[in-house]
Amino acid sequence: MEAYIFLRCFLLLALFHGSNQADVIIGHYKAWWAAVTLPNTTVQAMLPDDFELVTVKDWLPPGTHPVILEMGMEHDCGPVWPKRLQTTFMQFTYEIPFIKRKDSEATFNYKSIIYLDSEEESLASREVYRLNSSVVKPVNVSVEDGAFEFKYNDFTFKANATPKGAWNTTDAYPGFKQYINIMNLKWFGSPELTECAQHHYDFTSAKIRPAAMTVSVDHNLLSPMFPQGVLRLPGLDTAHGDLGTVEVDIHFTMTLPESCDQKKT
């Protein structure tokens, strides 16, 4: 019952405040962004039937496409007003950027799976943003200590990260521009693609640093096509194609859902 009360308050207040302001959600994200490069055929099989990959040129090996693992803590996240609805919670997102409908040229980021440790936030993400969100149990989540582990039913996701450099601005690492391109895309979670939203990250004030990461995923947590076993992901400074793992400390705003205008790219 408390979750539904939270959702109703969230919607009413966000919509009221958003009547003259596009971005009604704010937050402070301390997280890792990790790219896993897979064959095009593998990633294509992860998409809804009406979608296809947009070719990624120059910065990835030919015939490959990235999927992105976002994991960390969202601090003071919620409607810009009132602040008492802003919360701090764990979030994991499995997403496939640079995709489009087969009958359109508009490019999107598909947030395929969301795992959260908050019932209220999970409910809001499902009901407001139409995301495929589930509540999980954190086992060991500490961005400061390089640990991110959670359980969903009997399945476990585990990642460990080791910093590979000092904190710096985003322009200190040229390869980071690919993450900027990805995170600037409109995103959706429902295969029908009727409503989209968009983050607006403050890349100017953000702090980032490369991190090497090991990832272990039980088979049923992500797509069945996702690689099994332990993955070793290089840091941003050493990855082929300059799309390595990076730790981010960044503020953002976010829109409410809006119609996906497929005439715009």
Image (cartoon, rainbow, N blue to C red):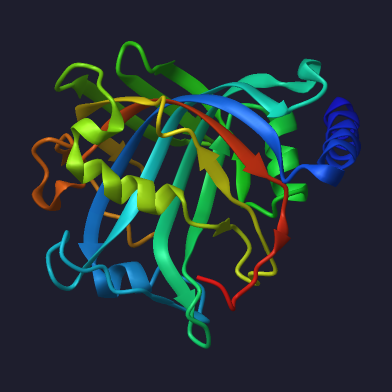
Vertical placement of residue 99 versus 230, above or below: below
* Residue 245 image point, x, y percent: 24, 37
Q: Work out which residue is located at the far top of the displayed protein and give it.
A: 145
Q: Residue at x 48, y 37 (%)?
A: 92
Q: Residue at x 26, y 72 (%)?
A: 40
Vertical placement of residue 15 versus 64, above or below: above
Image label count: 0
For this view, does 248 lie left or right of residue 93? Answer: left
Quick one: 54 or 181, which is closer to the camera?
181
Q: Work out which residue is located at the far bottom of the displayed protein and give it.
A: 103
* Residue 1 image point, x, y percent: 90, 29
* Residue 34 image point, x, y percent: 30, 40
Q: Residue at x 77, y 17 (%)?
A: 83
Q: Residue at x 34, y 30 (%)?
A: 158
For this view, does 169 lie left or right of residue 222? Answer: left
- Which corner quadrant of the image does residue 121 belong to? top right
- Which corner quadrant of the image does residue 195 belong to? bottom right
- In the rendered image, is residue 213 in sight? no
- Which corner quadrant of the image does residue 262 belong to? bottom right
For this view, does 224 lie left or right of residue 48? Answer: left
Quick one: 226 or 199, which is closer to the camera?
199
Vertical placement of residue 78 versus 55, above or below: above
- In the rendered image, is residue 144 in sight? yes
* Residue 78 image point, x, y percent: 70, 28
